Amino acid sequence: MGELFKWDRFFENIPKIVPYLSVTFAIVIFATVLGVLLGIVIAFVNMKKIPVLHQFFKVYVSFMRGTPMLVQLMLVYYGLPVLIDSAFGTNINREWSAITFAYITFILNQGAFLSAIFYSAITSIPYGQTEAGLSVGLTEIQTFKRIILPQMVRVALPPFGSDLVGLFQNSSLVFLIGVTDIMGRAKTIGTATKHVLEAYVFVAIVYIIISLIVRGLFKYLNDKFEFGKARKTIMLDEI
Amino acid sequence: MKTKINKLIAFVLILTLGATAAGCGKSSSDNKTGDSKTKVTKVIVGTGNAYEPYCYLDGKGNLTGYEYEVLKAVDELLPQYEFIYQTSDFANVLISLDAGKIDIAAHQYEWNKERDSKYLFGKEAYTTYVTYITVAGGRNDIKSLDDLRGKTVKSSTGSNSTYILESYNKEHADNPIKIAFVNNSTDEEAVTGLLNGVWDATIYTKRDVAKLNESYGDKKDALKVVGAPVQSSSTYFIFDRKNTDLQKAVDGAVKELRNNGKLSKISIDVIGGDYTESE
């Protein structure tokens, strides 16, 4: 067995892997932006207890939170087209690329997780505050925007940040359906050059850097949303 | 108040629909440009991304290898088809064929009964595939499948070696071979595991072992094949059961490539020896 790890191979791999960061980021950005929207919708439905939808989303969220990401990815990639194509006569099974299915999976997954974060953040604000807002003549939307939202953001931020860190790591699963992200590229470099450890080490470092940046960003946001209050949160450090 | 909320919901719906429409709009326009010129049928070929030298991604991240070269030559002979390549890990190639995502599965597939009952096999083989029990170079205790009972053998889901081992275990249920399902491991992981004793053996072709020894052997034989062949077979392209037209066309092209010597030339160029007739 030759040497398992060599620095020159490590540095050779960097320019080969870095371009694939765009794939990882695209998944995370799609999943976060559309996931936030979906999360808002689900949290709203749950707050308002809209019949049928409310029960549906309850099952949906518990499914998304209770099954492995990999299973969800396989179900969306192989199962979703069967449902949609037979219902609408489309052919997304072949026309949509693997990455589209990856986006959908991660959006659906993030929507569920974020809805739980939003819902718990909203309910953490005592209902008395809403009542107070309404009693002084604010509309429901004004009450939400001026009283609830500024407080719930602070509650939601730390779990949102750790969710985002987890999302970056989960995105490495897409390689299994044929989308080449940084993890996938590391693996294929391993096959082509016969040495895989250097590529894995580099990918590990990339994920560590990303997670440090995300955590730093959320710490900054967290401090910003203190609104000058001296209340010191230690939540971010605990997660 | 209510209308505002409705607007918000409508906005979200439009946004998600827009995003998905953008996704499918892209691919459908691709199809149109192909169709308008000639009556060319698009054929999606599913292959692997981590089996050197058959199907793997090169330094730039492009698909390369023996499967790709053969299929490219086949495609050149078939003007009515245009091949598009889609890579995934080995275990997912046949599942993609099941799901109708691909039309041809190409990943050094050997014929076996279980696969044959499910898929349409090409009639023209394009490589021979003779597999042996493979162990670490220093081991002398294993010579046949019988010696492997109670020992751990590395395999992967959906592979022919798994089929061989499981068939063996059906007849020897009292002390079966332990099958370790290791999906999409790299060559380096496989060699390391066999040398460390994580697995006692695995099943490879001689040319795979020669390749691994060259890459990781340090001029010694890291691995060696033992005993008689576990199975002597050939590899074929696999199609959906309904897709006989495509199968016949591809078979015809493979036959032509064999007859004009191009197939063996690709084999020598890419694999390093002529593995198209017999070993």
Image (cartoon, helix red, strand yellow):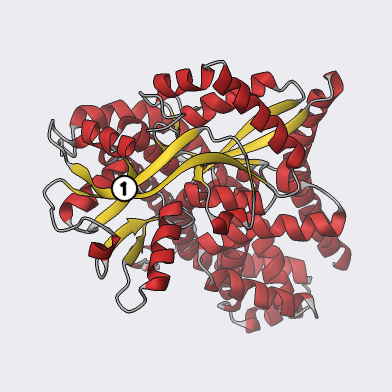
Q: Chain of mark 1?
A: B
The amino acid pointed to by label 1 is Tyr
| Residue beneath the point at 45% across and 53% down | B160
| Residue beneath the point at 58% across and 58% down | A74
Q: Nearer the viewer, residue B231 or B82?
A: B231
* In the displayed structure image, the side of residue A65 where residue B13 appears, left or right: right
Q: What secondary structure is found at the residue carrying circle 1?
A: strand
The residue positioned farthest toward the right in the image shown: B3
Looking at the rendered image, the quarter that the C terminus of chain A falls into is bottom left
Tell me if residue B37 comes above or below residue A177 in the rendering.
above
* In the displayed structure image, the side of residue B161 where residue A104 appears, left or right: right
| Residue beneath the point at 64% across and 79% down | A129
The x, y position of residue A31, in whole percent, is 59, 52
The x, y position of residue A191, in whole percent, is 36, 36
Q: Residues within 10 Å of mark 1 (few under 14, many from 20)?
A: many
Which residue matches tag 1? B132
Q: Nearer the viewer, residue B28 or A152?
A: B28
| Residue beneath the point at 53% across and 70% down | A67
The x, y position of residue A25, in whole percent, is 51, 42
The x, y position of residue A64, in whole percent, is 59, 69
Tell me if residue B223 comes above or below residue A155 in the rendering.
above
